[in-house]
Amino acid sequence: MKTKINQAAPTGTREPWESEADRRGVRYWMELLFKSPVGTVGFIIIVLVILSSLLAGVISPYDPAKIVYADKLIPPAWCEGGSMAHLLGTDSLGRDLLTRILVGARVSLLVGIFSVVVAGVIGTSLGLVAGYYGSWIDSVIMRVADAFHAIPRILLAMVVLFVLGPSVLTLIMVIGVTNWVSYARLIRGEVLTLKEKEFVKASRTIGAGDGAILMRHILPNVFAQFIVVSTISVASSIIIEATMSFLGLGIQPPDVSWGVMLADGRNYLATNWWVCTFPGVAITVTVLGIMFLGNWLRDVLDPKKPRNSIKAGDHFG
């Protein structure tokens, strides 16, 4: 008669990620967040950007692609010749800038988030395999990573987009595939340390398979580092999307993105500054908000400072 083996960690062996902070839940994390000025500012910026993009039709009723030559190059409302009907003014085709910025946020956030998902899945999977199994598998994966790292990321993205043609899906895949190396190296380094820990050895001793160890014991312990890297990667992906769209290899008109708006307004910077200034400000503020939140997460999830030792009154950043 076979005895069923329980593959959970032995009694008394607590996973490092099963801390008091995890058990307290969302309220605990919100308390930590609002005690950090940097984290709070970043969180508020991101929430405002997401909400304003989702409520673009309510905030500004204009069609972002509708051309109205009679309203072209109207200054912002507070400038001479401006109109309250167009708070941030209009572009060279009479399109409302506020509407286009709000709608463009959807595309920029979509590309930024989903490209990070693609990069994270590829990089984390390869990092787990390389770190856990080692040997020639580790060598092959790391040499491939070195090859990707040696090629300038933006140059590689430009070449692929030029060959395949620009589209939202292609842009997401290109940015994701060119960004997996940082995930793979980080996760591999964490796994090399974790696989020698007592709780992993104990699980292996009682008969847990490689898949169970990786998914149940190792992956949860690298998730904190994954979140921090992903947050920063969203910011860099938004910048790359804007760069590709500015160069004509990303989002294509009549679709709207911040990079497209910068390209539309570059010839008017000296005479009609608002056409490309406001999209540039939108990119800057959004990226700063994401970076602020990422820095807060880095401090809170720092493995050198156990989460169960962090008090709600601590200040980060």
Image: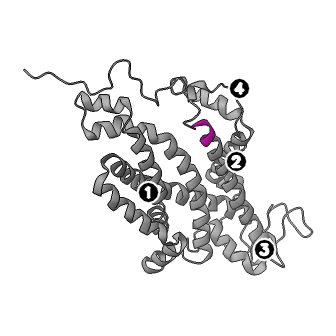
What amino acid type should be assigned to the residue bearing mark 4?
Answer: Gly
The residue sitting at 67% across, 43% down in the picture is 43
Q: Where residue 73 sits: x, y (%)?
A: 80, 75
What amino acid type should be assigned to the residue bearing mark 3?
Answer: Asp
* Quadrant location, the C terminus: top right
Q: Is 62 included in the stretch rendered in magenta?
A: no
Sequence-wise, the earlier of marks 3 and 2 is: 2
Report the front residue among 148 and 68. Answer: 148
Sequence-wise, the earlier of marks 4 and 2 is: 2
Question: Which mark identifies residue 45?
Answer: 2
Query: Would you identify the image quadrant in which residue 65 lies?
Result: bottom right
Furthest toward the right, the residue is 80
Report the front residue among 121 and 265. Answer: 121
What amino acid type should be assigned to the residue bearing mark 2?
Answer: Ile
The Cα–Cα distance between marks 4 and 2, rounded to whole angstroms, is 22 Å
The Cα–Cα distance between marks 1 and 4, rounded to whole angstroms, is 36 Å
Q: Which residues are magenta?
A: 297-302
**Residue 277 visible in the current orientation:** yes
Main secondary structure of the magenta stretch = helix
Query: Would you identify the image quadrant in which residue 13 lies?
Result: top left
Q: Give the residue pinned by disc 1.
A: 118
Do labels 3 and 4 touch, CB within 8 Å?
Answer: no
Q: Give the residue pinned by disc 4.
A: 313
Of badges 3 and 1, nearer the viewer stands 1
Q: Secondary structure at mark 2?
A: helix
What amino acid type should be assigned to the residue bearing mark 1?
Answer: Val
Sequence-wise, the earlier of marks 3 and 1 is: 3
Q: Secondary structure at mark 3?
A: helix
